[in-house]
Image (cartoon, grey):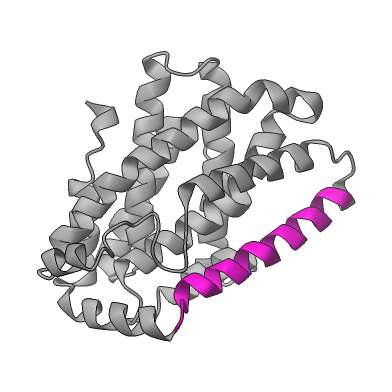
Amino acid sequence: MAANSIAAVIEALNTIVNNCRQTDSRAGYFAALYKKVTMAVAHKIEAGYFDDGPRMEKLDVVFANRYLQAYHSYIQGQPCSQCWQLAFDACKSWQPMVMHHLLMGMNAHIGLDLGIAAAQIAPGQLINSLHNDFNKINQLLAELIEEVKTCLYSLWPLSKYISNLKLGSLENNLAGFSMTIARDAAWQVAQEYAMLQHAWQQAQYITVRDSSVAVFSHKLLHPGAWLQSTTAILKIGETGTVAEKITRLDKKIQPAILL
């Protein structure tokens, strides 16, 4: 059943986090991060941060439901988008670092889902009135990056070594993932999708966009020989079980924007 409020989204995400912790599923890494993002958005709506709070709650719910649907489709053996399929499939392997899993989830959710969700709640020319709040919600995502990086450092005894190598910027490593680029691409998707009037056009657009995002997801997972070798070494330094890492992410990501 789809969530119909931010409170319901947070409850659904918390259920996923707990289930993944109990089953040692690496899918819990992104779910823990996403729960914190959603809590931050809810706080900002209550504080009057957005131009149109009710509309932003609607966007947050529509946006989150795309992830929730993809997750539940996957665990039930049903089809989901290519980029989410890659992200969830990667959770079966011990080789990717926590960082890989977070970036692949962010790539799928921002690269595919965010623009489509924005266009669905502000179709046609209405999409232009959403631009300011769209940038604000992306700013919240960007602000969380430093908190994520700090949390990931706590998983690695080699964190000082990582910093010296200048590999600590979550935003700019692993094949060049950039929040700025992701945000701008998502806004372009929103503008283009908002102008599509027929279901067949929308379905075709999503298929093409999904394929493009999936290509970059593959690049994130296989970033090239040098970086792959480096991250393989750093992977050795990750400490704790999957459940323990999920717990750290769930508890230690405390964005300043919530204070």
Residue 2 in view of the camera: no
182 lies left or right of 227? right
29 lies left or right of 133? left
Q: Quadrant of the C terminus?
A: top left
Residue pictured at 18% horizontal, 73% vertical: 238
5 lies left or right of 206? left
Image coordinates of residue 76 in percent, x first then y, are 54, 68
Residue 132 in view of the camera: yes
Q: Quadrant of residue 174?
A: bottom left
Image coordinates of residue 252 in percent, x first then y, are 18, 47
Does 78 appear above or below 250? below
Image coordinates of residue 83 in percent, x first then y, are 59, 65
Whether the magenta-drawn stretch holds residue 232 is answered as no
172 lies left or right of 217? left
Image coordinates of residue 128 in percent, x first then y, are 71, 25
Q: Main secondary structure of the magenta part?
A: helix
Does 36 appear above or below 161? above
Q: Quadrant of residue 55?
A: top right
Name the one closer to the observer, 142 or 38.
142
Name the one closer to the observer, 131 or 36.
131
- Figure disc tally: 0
Residue pictured at 33% horizontal, 60% vertical: 29
Residue pictured at 34% horizontal, 38% vertical: 143
Whether the magenta-drawn stretch holds residue 217 is answered as yes
Magenta stretch bounds: 201-224
Residue pictured at 47% horizontal, 48% vertical: 179
Name the one closer to the observer, 72 or 118.
118
Q: Quadrant of residue 227?
A: bottom left
